[in-house]
Image: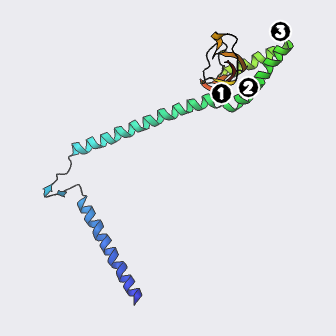
């Protein structure tokens, strides 16, 4: 007996749902809608055409924005795609410079030629050395202060006195901050 009641209840619920759906369809039909006793006139073909043109224009604008955004992201990706390898090559550049200074190589010696060739190739890929900051005021956007030492003169107070490690940019973005010593 309980099974019959459950079946009858399910049938009744289905009938109620179907009646609700039918009433929603008639209420939302574009032909005529009643709102507080007023009869709405269906939209004209010109109005429908204007709506479709607006939808089309918005869709086109959205697609155009998407296309521009993906182009911009792709350009940024190409500019910074070498970031990992460039970061791993920076210590090699530093060691080349230390070796050249320690051994007093001339411009025609092998290590100097290899260093210059490596640097030129990296510059072609977007690597750029930061300007020498010695004598300039500490700029935390580009410099990392490693230590403070007493300034030799009052003019050098708060300014960069020495560079421990050069800073580099890759495609205009900081790859490595310049490690500097600041006068106190």
CA–CA distance in space, label 3 to label 2? 22 Å
- Picture coordinates of residue 23, whole percent (x, y): 25, 65
SS category of the residue bearing label 1 = strand
Q: Is residue 180 above or below residue 28?
A: above
Which mark sits nearer the N-terminus, 2 or 1? 2
Residue drawn at point x = 75 percent, y = 17 percent: 117
SS category of the residue bearing label 3 = loop
Residue nearest the observer in this picture, 31 or 79:
79
Q: Quadrant of the N terminus?
A: bottom left
Residue drawn at point x = 39 percent, y = 37 percent: 60
Q: Which mark is residue 90?
A: 2
CA–CA distance in space, label 2 to label 1? 10 Å
Residue nearest the observer in this picture, 70 or 140:
140
The residue indicated by pointer 1 is 175
- Picture coordinates of residue 80, whole percent (x, y): 62, 30
**Residue 90 sits in quarter:** top right
- Picture coordinates of residue 127, whole percent (x, y): 66, 22
The residue indicated by pointer 3 is 106
């Amino acid at each position: 007996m309980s099974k019959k009641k459950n079946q009858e209840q399910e049938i009744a619920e289905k009938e109620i749902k179907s009646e609700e759906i039918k009433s929603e369809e008639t209420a939302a039909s574009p032909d005529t809608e009643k709102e507080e006793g007023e009869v709405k006139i269906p939209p004209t073909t010109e109005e429908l055409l204007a709506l479709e043109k607006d939808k089309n224009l918005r869709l086109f604008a959205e697609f155009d924005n998407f296309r521009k955004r993906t182009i911009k992201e792709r350009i940024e990706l190409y500019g910074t795609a070498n970031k990992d390898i460039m970061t791993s090559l920076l210590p090699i550049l530093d060691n080349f410079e230390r070796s050249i200074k320690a051994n007093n190589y001339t411009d025609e010696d092998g290590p100097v030629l290899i260093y210059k060739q490596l640097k030129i190739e990296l510059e072609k890929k977007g690597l750029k050395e930061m300007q020498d900051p010695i004598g300039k005021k500490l700029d935390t956007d580009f410099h990392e202060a490693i230590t403070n030492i007493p300034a030799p003169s009052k003019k050098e107070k708060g300014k960069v006195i020495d560079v421990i490690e050069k800073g580099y940019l890759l495609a205009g973005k900081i790859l490595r901050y310049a490690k500097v010593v600041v006068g106190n």
